[in-house]
Amino acid sequence: MAAGGGGGVIWMRPERAAAGRPAGHSRDEITAAAVAIADREGLDAVSMRRVAADLGTGAASLYRYLHTREDLLDLMIDATGAEYALTAPTGDWLADLLDIGEQARAIMRHHPWLPPLLITRPVLGPNGLVLLEHVLETLASHPASTAAKLEAFALLTAATALFVQNELAGGPARQQRNAAYLHHWLVRCVRVAGACRGEVLPLAVGRPGW
C-alpha cells in the first residue's frame, strides 16, 4: 500500500484540517479535477497548483485536504475503482473474473496514466477494498486460500496494467493481435492448470482479456 504524505494513509486522516476557513471543496471534488487533468494532459500536468487553478482557488487551500501530491495520486488511483460495475457472482468464478478483467482493461484504457501508477505504487483505499471484497466473494467456491486469491488478483492487476501499457503504445493493429493471443493463451493455461505452478498461478492465469 502506498502511503500518502507525512500523516500516513490519507483515508485514516480527517477529510480536511480542523483549522482554517470553512471547507470550499471536498476531497472528491479535488480528486475529480486531478483525474480530469490527467486524462486530458497526462500525469505530469497534475500539480497542486494546477488542480487548485481548475477549481478556482489557491494552491495553499488544497493543503487543508491533502499533505502532498502523493496523497493526490493515491486518491486518483482509488477513485478509478468506483468505475467498476460489480454485479452479484453468477457461480462461474472464471466468467465473473473475465468480466472484472474486461472492466479493468477498459478503465485503464480510459485513464492512460493509471497503468504505470498501479505498477509502481499500488494503493488500497475504500474503492479498492470494495473491489477486493467482490473478488473474494466471486472466488468463494474456489479451493485456494484467501492469501492465494489476493495474491492472484494482485498479479492479474499488474498483468493487466502491463498489457494495457503495451496496447496503448502499439496502435490498433498491435492491440488486436495482442488481445487475441493473450485470450488464447490464458484460456489454454486454465484448461491445463494442473501443469501450472502452485495454487496461485492456476488461478492467476485464469483471466482472458487482461
Image (spheres, grey):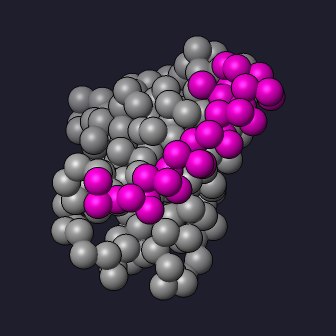
Is 190 a magenta residue? yes
Is 144 a magenta residue? no
Residue at the spot x=59%, y=77% of the render? 87
The stretch in magenta equals 166-195
Q: In which quarter of the image is the N terminus?
A: top left
Residue reaching furthest to the top: 44
Query: Is the residue 45 above or below the residue 67 in the image?
Result: above
Q: In which quarter of the image is residue 178?
A: top right
Number of dots carrying numbers: 0
Q: Which of 21 and 188 is in front in this view?
A: 188
Residue 158, x across and y down, in percent: 42, 38
Residue at the spot x=49%, y=26% of the render? 116
Magenta span main SS: helix
Residue 126, x across and y down, in percent: 41, 58
Query: Is the residue 73 above or below the residue 151 in the image?
Result: above
Q: Which of 185 and 80 is in front in this view?
A: 185
Q: Which of 29 and 111 is in front in this view?
A: 111
Residue 46, x across and y down, in percent: 59, 21
